[in-house]
Amino acid sequence: MIANLVYGENWLRTAEGSCILISRSRENNNGMETVKQRPVYLNLFKIRLPVGGVASIAHRVTGVLLVLLLPAAIYLLALSLESLAGFHKAIGFLTSIPGRIIVLLSVWLFAQHFFSGIRHLLLDIDIGIEKGAARAGAWLVFLATGVTVVVLGFWIL
Protein backbone atom coordinates (compact mmCIF):
# COMPACT_ATOMS: atom_id res chain seq x y z
CA MET A 1 0.00 0.00 0.00
CA ILE A 2 2.83 2.42 0.74
CA ALA A 3 4.35 3.76 -2.44
CA ASN A 4 7.99 4.77 -2.71
CA LEU A 5 9.15 7.14 -0.02
CA VAL A 6 10.42 10.44 -1.35
CA TYR A 7 13.04 12.28 0.70
CA GLY A 8 11.21 14.07 3.45
CA GLU A 9 7.75 12.99 2.39
CA ASN A 10 5.63 9.85 2.81
CA TRP A 11 2.89 8.91 0.39
CA LEU A 12 0.03 6.44 0.67
CA ARG A 13 -1.36 4.87 -2.50
CA THR A 14 -5.18 4.57 -2.65
CA ALA A 15 -7.25 1.96 -4.50
CA GLU A 16 -7.61 4.27 -7.50
CA GLY A 17 -3.84 4.58 -7.77
CA SER A 18 -3.61 8.17 -6.58
CA CYS A 19 -1.18 9.12 -3.82
CA ILE A 20 -1.99 11.00 -0.64
CA LEU A 21 0.63 12.88 1.34
CA ILE A 22 0.63 11.66 4.94
CA SER A 23 3.63 13.50 6.41
CA ARG A 24 6.17 16.14 5.50
CA SER A 25 9.54 17.08 6.95
CA ARG A 26 9.98 20.57 8.35
CA GLU A 27 12.91 22.52 9.69
CA ASN A 28 12.86 23.74 13.25
CA ASN A 29 14.61 26.84 14.63
CA ASN A 30 18.00 25.08 14.80
CA GLY A 31 18.01 24.34 11.08
CA MET A 32 17.57 20.62 11.76
CA GLU A 33 14.91 18.63 9.98
CA THR A 34 12.19 17.08 12.08
CA VAL A 35 9.54 14.71 10.87
CA LYS A 36 6.01 15.11 12.16
CA GLN A 37 4.03 11.94 11.63
CA ARG A 38 0.52 13.26 11.25
CA PRO A 39 -2.02 12.65 8.52
CA VAL A 40 -2.54 15.59 6.22
CA TYR A 41 -5.49 13.97 4.43
CA LEU A 42 -6.50 10.36 4.72
CA ASN A 43 -9.87 9.27 3.38
CA LEU A 44 -10.46 5.81 4.82
CA PHE A 45 -13.27 5.13 2.36
CA LYS A 46 -10.87 5.39 -0.59
CA ILE A 47 -8.29 2.97 0.81
CA ARG A 48 -9.00 -0.58 -0.31
CA LEU A 49 -7.84 -3.23 2.15
CA PRO A 50 -7.22 -6.79 1.04
CA VAL A 51 -9.78 -9.34 2.23
CA GLY A 52 -7.33 -10.61 4.86
CA GLY A 53 -7.13 -7.12 6.37
CA VAL A 54 -10.91 -6.83 6.43
CA ALA A 55 -11.14 -10.24 8.16
CA SER A 56 -8.54 -9.17 10.71
CA ILE A 57 -10.33 -5.91 11.48
CA ALA A 58 -13.68 -7.74 11.66
CA HIS A 59 -12.11 -10.14 14.19
CA ARG A 60 -11.07 -7.24 16.41
CA VAL A 61 -14.37 -5.36 16.10
CA THR A 62 -16.47 -8.44 16.85
CA GLY A 63 -14.30 -9.18 19.87
CA VAL A 64 -14.91 -5.71 21.26
CA LEU A 65 -18.64 -5.93 20.59
CA LEU A 66 -18.85 -9.34 22.26
CA VAL A 67 -17.18 -7.92 25.36
CA LEU A 68 -19.62 -5.01 25.34
CA LEU A 69 -22.55 -7.46 25.17
CA LEU A 70 -21.37 -9.39 28.24
CA PRO A 71 -23.14 -7.19 30.84
CA ALA A 72 -26.48 -7.63 29.07
CA ALA A 73 -25.97 -11.40 28.84
CA ILE A 74 -25.00 -11.59 32.52
CA TYR A 75 -28.06 -9.51 33.45
CA LEU A 76 -30.38 -11.83 31.50
CA LEU A 77 -28.75 -14.87 33.11
CA ALA A 78 -29.12 -13.39 36.59
CA LEU A 79 -32.73 -12.42 35.85
CA SER A 80 -33.57 -15.92 34.65
CA LEU A 81 -31.98 -17.55 37.71
CA GLU A 82 -33.63 -15.15 40.17
CA SER A 83 -37.13 -16.61 40.13
CA LEU A 84 -39.72 -18.22 37.91
CA ALA A 85 -41.17 -14.79 37.08
CA GLY A 86 -37.69 -13.52 36.18
CA PHE A 87 -37.16 -16.56 33.97
CA HIS A 88 -40.41 -15.86 32.11
CA LYS A 89 -39.47 -12.19 31.79
CA ALA A 90 -36.08 -13.09 30.27
CA ILE A 91 -37.68 -15.63 27.92
CA GLY A 92 -40.34 -13.09 26.98
CA PHE A 93 -37.65 -10.60 25.99
CA LEU A 94 -35.59 -13.15 24.04
CA THR A 95 -38.63 -14.41 22.12
CA SER A 96 -39.81 -10.92 21.15
CA ILE A 97 -38.86 -9.56 17.73
CA PRO A 98 -36.20 -7.12 19.04
CA GLY A 99 -34.83 -9.87 21.29
CA ARG A 100 -34.59 -12.32 18.40
CA ILE A 101 -32.80 -9.73 16.28
CA ILE A 102 -30.34 -9.10 19.11
CA VAL A 103 -29.77 -12.85 19.47
CA LEU A 104 -29.23 -13.19 15.72
CA LEU A 105 -26.73 -10.31 15.73
CA SER A 106 -24.99 -11.92 18.69
CA VAL A 107 -24.78 -15.20 16.76
CA TRP A 108 -23.23 -13.31 13.84
CA LEU A 109 -20.70 -11.63 16.15
CA PHE A 110 -19.78 -14.92 17.78
CA ALA A 111 -19.54 -16.84 14.48
CA GLN A 112 -17.40 -14.15 12.85
CA HIS A 113 -15.09 -13.97 15.86
CA PHE A 114 -14.90 -17.77 16.16
CA PHE A 115 -14.05 -18.47 12.52
CA SER A 116 -11.62 -15.53 12.34
CA GLY A 117 -9.95 -16.81 15.49
CA ILE A 118 -9.53 -20.27 13.95
CA ARG A 119 -8.01 -18.62 10.86
CA HIS A 120 -5.57 -16.63 13.01
CA LEU A 121 -4.58 -19.75 14.96
CA LEU A 122 -3.87 -21.58 11.70
CA LEU A 123 -1.82 -18.64 10.45
CA ASP A 124 0.17 -18.71 13.70
CA ILE A 125 1.28 -22.28 12.98
CA ASP A 126 2.09 -21.40 9.35
CA ILE A 127 -0.93 -23.04 7.76
CA GLY A 128 -2.37 -20.94 4.94
CA ILE A 129 0.36 -18.31 5.18
CA GLU A 130 0.90 -17.97 1.42
CA LYS A 131 -0.87 -15.09 -0.29
CA GLY A 132 -3.42 -17.16 -2.20
CA ALA A 133 -4.18 -19.46 0.71
CA ALA A 134 -4.50 -16.53 3.12
CA ARG A 135 -6.94 -14.80 0.77
CA ALA A 136 -8.97 -18.01 0.35
CA GLY A 137 -8.97 -18.51 4.13
CA ALA A 138 -10.34 -15.01 4.68
CA TRP A 139 -13.12 -15.59 2.15
CA LEU A 140 -13.81 -18.96 3.78
CA VAL A 141 -14.24 -17.20 7.14
CA PHE A 142 -16.88 -14.87 5.68
CA LEU A 143 -18.59 -17.78 3.91
CA ALA A 144 -18.68 -19.94 7.06
CA THR A 145 -20.03 -16.99 9.06
CA GLY A 146 -22.76 -16.36 6.50
CA VAL A 147 -23.80 -20.01 6.38
CA THR A 148 -23.87 -20.21 10.18
CA VAL A 149 -26.00 -17.08 10.49
CA VAL A 150 -28.43 -18.21 7.79
CA VAL A 151 -28.83 -21.72 9.25
CA LEU A 152 -29.22 -20.50 12.82
CA GLY A 153 -31.33 -17.55 11.64
CA PHE A 154 -34.05 -19.92 10.46
CA TRP A 155 -34.03 -21.55 13.87
CA ILE A 156 -33.92 -18.26 15.84
CA LEU A 157 -36.42 -16.26 13.84
Image (tube, grey):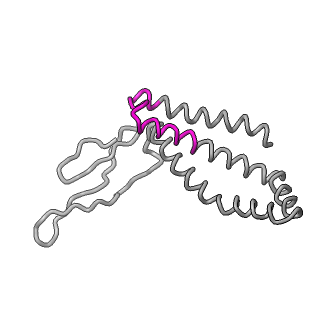
8 w.r.t. 139: above or below:
below
Residue in the image at 57% along x and 45% along y: 113
Magenta stretch?
Answer: 113-135
**Which quadrant, please, contains the N terminus?**
top left
Give the quarter of the image for residue 107: top right
Report the number of discs.
0
Is 124 covered by the magenta stretch? yes
Q: Position of residue 49 (x, y in %)?
A: 44, 41
**Which quadrant, please, contains the C terminus?**
top right
Residue in the image at 36% along x and 38% along y: 17
Give the quarter of the image for residue 133: top left
Left or right, 37 with reference to 69: left
Give the quarter of the image for residue 86: bottom right
View extreme (left): residue? 31
View extreme (top): residue? 132
Q: Nearer the viewer, residue 8 or 54?
A: 54
108 w.r.t. 141: above or below:
below
136 w.r.t. 69: above or below:
above
Q: Position of residue 71 (x, y in %)?
A: 66, 63
Left or right, 64 with reference to 75: left
Q: Position of residue 18 (x, y in %)?
A: 35, 41
Residue in the image at 50% along x and 41% along y: 55
Residue in the image at 65% along x and 44% along y: 108
Q: Position of residue 25 (x, y in %)?
A: 21, 59
Magenta stretch: dominant SS?
helix
Q: Nearer the viewer, residue 122 or 27?
A: 122
Is 26 covered by the magenta stretch? no
